[in-house]
Structures are given as structure tokens and as C-alpha cells.
Image: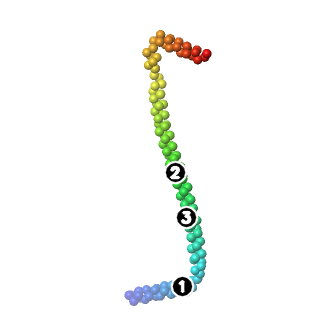
Amino acid sequence: MGSLLKDIKTIFILVLATALILSFIFRPSVPIETYETEINTLKQQNQKLLLSNDSINQINKKLQEEITVMLYAIDSTKVILKQTENKLSKLEKRRNEISTIVNTMDSDDITNTFSNYLKRRSKGNH
């Protein structure tokens, strides 16, 4: 049994060696110039891709700068909006308040103030 296994291994090795030798003998010969042409073509394509990549990187950088400016503008707008909302909230709270100036005036003060207003207004019309 052991010698049969050895014989099978030997036959298998011989078949593989023969196939390898035949592949070297009958392979199509490709001139070296073909490879040089392919290499030069690939180098040119690589150069074009590198230039394209640089252009894309520059465009991405500009877009990132624009995004940064827009984000800053959005943040500034949010701050202003918050301030406006706070002012609006304060005004809504004070909307139904009665001014203390009116409460402290009596009827004579109101009459005098109104008369002074009318006098000033009539002087402005002349």
C-alpha cells in the first residue's frame, strides 16, 4: 500500500512537471514593447486621475469653507432669533399691564398735560 501511494505521488509530480514545461514551450510570446506601451498608457491615466483628484480636492476645500460660513451665519441667526423671542416674550407679558404713569395722575394733571400737548401741537402748525 505504501509503495502504491509513492507511485501515485511520483506520477502526479511527473504530470505536473510535464504540464509546466509544455506551458512554457507553447505559451504565446508577447513582445516586451507591448508591456511598455501598457505601462505608459497606465502612467498617463494615473497622471490624469491625479490631476482630477487635485481638482476635486480643491473644490471640496472651497465647499467646506462655504459650509463653515453658512454654519456661522446659521448660528448667528439662531442667537438673534433667541434674543428676539426673549424680547417678544417680555412684550407679551407686559401687553396687558397698565402704565404706572397713568395711575398716579389725577384729573387735573391729565387736563394740564393734554392742554400742554395741544399747545405744542398748535405751535408746530404755524
Report which residue position mark 3 lands on: 50
Report which residue position mark 2 lands on: 65
Residue at the image position 58 percent from the left and 73 percent from the top: 40
**Residue 37, position in %: x, y?**
60, 75
Quarter occupied by the N terminus: bottom left
Q: Nearer the viewer, residue 15 or 76?
A: 76
Amino acid under disc 1 = Phe
**Secondary structure under badge 1?**
helix
- Mark 1 vs mark 3: in front: 3
**Residue 11, position in %: x, y?**
46, 88
Q: CA distance from mark 1 to mark 3?
A: 38 Å
Going from N to C along the chain, the mark reached first, 2 or 1, is: 1
Report how many numbered discs are placed on residues in the image: 3
**Residue 35, position in %: x, y?**
57, 77
Q: Residues within 10 Å of mark 3 (few under 14, many from 20)?
A: few
Report which residue position mark 1 lands on: 24
Going from N to C along the chain, the mark reached first, 2 or 3, is: 3
Q: CA distance from mark 2 to mark 3?
A: 23 Å
Amino acid under disc 3 = Leu
Q: Residues within 10 Å of mark 1 (few under 14, many from 20)?
A: few
Quarter occupied by the C terminus: top right
Q: Nearer the viewer, residue 39 or 126?
A: 126
**Secondary structure under badge 2?**
helix
Going from N to C along the chain, the mark reached first, 1 or 3, is: 1
For residue 115, say whether it is visible. Answer: yes
Q: Nearer the viewer, residue 7 or 102?
A: 102
**Residue 12, position in %: x, y?**
46, 85
